[in-house]
Amino acid sequence: MPTSPKTKTKKTEPKRMSDEAVKAKTGKNWKEWFTIIDKAGGRKKTHQEIVVYLRTKHKVSDWWQQMVTVVYEQARGKRVKHQTAKGFQVGGNKTINVPITTLYKAWITEGSRRPWLPHSDITIRKSTLNKSMRLTWVDGKTHVDVQFYEKDGGKSQVTLEHSKLPNTREANRMKSYWARALTKLKETVEI
């Protein structure tokens, strides 16, 4: 039986902001930042050390210190997609054609979550009416931060971040889980 030649799989880099966007905000493109950080010993520095270096030596603003550092770490193999300093984090969002009060009510009790959220027995640690919720996930270890926003035309949007996930596999699983759950939420409340 003939064998097919092995094909090389091209390693894809995570999506990131364009060179034009980063240069417009920081004065340098990604390649320039990578070179600068490499010359400063970035491959051996911690995340925090790179952030301090960008702040003190290059006067980069707070948000861009984090952005440049994370993208550098990903490009150099020091960090993988969805990884944060405290585990892995994924997000999701959905704009839904209902008022914000309806959307918020779909989250607030286990009974209102049950039709669209397979694991509806979460713990709400804190909530602000029609604004936000902080949840402990059913595993008792990971957290979900949920935000609610009013949109034009009587619509509203929910965004969430699920954090402290233990690894890439779980992050990918929960990313898919939340995409399905938010789609089901939309189908459930837009009746």
Image (cartoon, rainbow, N blue to C red):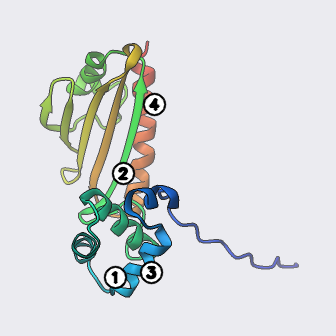
Q: Amino acid at mark 1?
A: Gly
SS state under label 2: strand
| Label ID, residue 42 | 1
Mark-to-mark CA distance, 4 and 1: 41 Å
Which residue is at 37% across, 28% downward?
Answer: 116
Nearest to the eye among marks 4 and 2: give it: 2
**Quick one: quadrant of the C terminus?**
top left
Q: Amino acid at mark 3?
A: Thr
**x and y percent of residue 100 in the render?**
29, 19
Using the image as rendered, state which of residue 177 and residue 152 is in the foreground: 152
Residue that carries the numbered disc 3 in the rendered image: 35
Mark-to-mark CA distance, 3 and 4: 42 Å
Q: Amino acid at mark 4?
A: Thr
Residue that carries the numbered disc 2 in the rendered image: 90
**x and y percent of residue 117 in the render?**
34, 32
Q: Residue furthest left?
A: 126
SS state under label 3: helix
Using the image as rendered, state which of residue 153 and residue 86 is in the foreground: 153
- State which tag comes first along the sequence, 3 or 4: 3
**Quick one: quadrant of the N terminus?**
bottom right
SS state under label 4: helix
- State which tag comes first along the sequence, 1 or 2: 1
**x and y percent of residue 34 in the render?**
43, 76
Mark-to-mark CA distance, 3 and 1: 9 Å
Residue that carries the numbered disc 4 in the rendered image: 183
**x and y percent of residue 73 in the render?**
38, 73
Visible in this render: residue 82?
Answer: yes
Mark-to-mark CA distance, 1 and 2: 26 Å
Contact, CB < 8 Å: mark 4 with mark 1?
Answer: no
Quadrant assignment, res 182:
top left
Nearest to the eye among marks 1 and 2: give it: 1
SS state under label 1: loop
